[in-house]
Image (cartoon, rainbow, N blue to C red):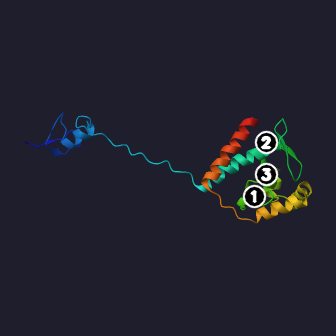
């Protein structure tokens, strides 16, 4: 058989049909040759713990701000008592977010304005005085003990918490 130039790959090969070589004809008409493209089903990658922590932080922050908000969506800063809308406030932590054991603990978190939470680094002196007064010595000490304990965060726990707080937020809205 004489070789001709394939109309698809433009190489001199044996022409099978419609001016195409065998490999080009298979690529263009796989059903003719009963070749099905295999779909590779990949497992959905589970989200990493750090991604889930960020998601929980977002949902939990919104939960805390809503928890302390009035019916107009205004929240009072825990440390300077300025009132602002939920969107302008942040979730302030008494014990740092670095401590997983208290990171999402209601007794540890209060709404704060940007000025107190970021610029004044939590306005820690006022925060401490108010926390001691509000919680009482016993509850304050148990929060301190909890902060000093270790807590290993697992993906499943984070996913459950995200779902729980989303459900709570949905009830408020």
The residue carrying mark 2 is 66
Query: Which of these two is toward me, 133 or 86?
Result: 133
The residue carrying mark 3 is 106
Report whether 156 appears left or right of 113.
Answer: left
Mark yes or no: residue 17 visible: yes
Residue beneath the point at 8% across and 42% down: 2
The residue carrying mark 1 is 102
3D distance between C-alphas at marks 3 and 2:
13 Å
3D distance between C-alphas at marks 1 and 3:
8 Å
Mark 1 and mark 2 lie on one chain; the one further toward the N terminus is 2
- SS class, disc 3: helix
Query: Which of these two is toward me, 73 or 150?
Result: 150
Residue beneath the point at 80% across and 57% down: 119
Mark 3 and mark 2 lie on one chain; the one further toward the N terminus is 2
- Quick one: quadrant of the N terminus? top left
Q: Residue 87: horizontal and vertical position, in percent?
A: 76, 43
Q: Is disc 3 surrounded by few (<14), some (14 to 19) or many (20+) residues within 10 Å? A: few
Q: Are marks 3 and 2 in contact (CB under 8 Å)?
A: no
The image's mark for residue 65 is: none
């Amino acid at each position: 058989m004489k070789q001709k130039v394939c109309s698809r790959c433009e190489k001199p090969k044996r022409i099978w049909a419609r001016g195409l070589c065998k490999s080009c004809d298979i690529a263009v008409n796989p059903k003719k040759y009963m070749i099905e493209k295999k779909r590779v089903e990949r497992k959905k990658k589970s989200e990493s713990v750090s991604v889930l922590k960020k998601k929980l932080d977002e949902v939990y922050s919104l939960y805390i701000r809503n928890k302390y908000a009035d019916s107009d969506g205004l929240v009072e800063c825990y440390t300077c008592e300025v009132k602002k809308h939920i969107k302008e406030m942040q979730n302030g932590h008494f014990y740092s977010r670095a401590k997983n054991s208290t990171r999402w603990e209601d007794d540890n978190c209060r709404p704060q304005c940007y000025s107190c939470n970021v610029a004044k680094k939590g306005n820690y002196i006022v925060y401490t005085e108010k926390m001691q007064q509000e919680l009482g010595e016993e509850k304050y000490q148990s929060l301190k003990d909890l902060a000093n304990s270790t807590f290993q965060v697992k993906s499943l726990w984070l996913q459950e918490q995200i779902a729980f707080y989303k459900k709570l937020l949905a009830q408020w809205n």
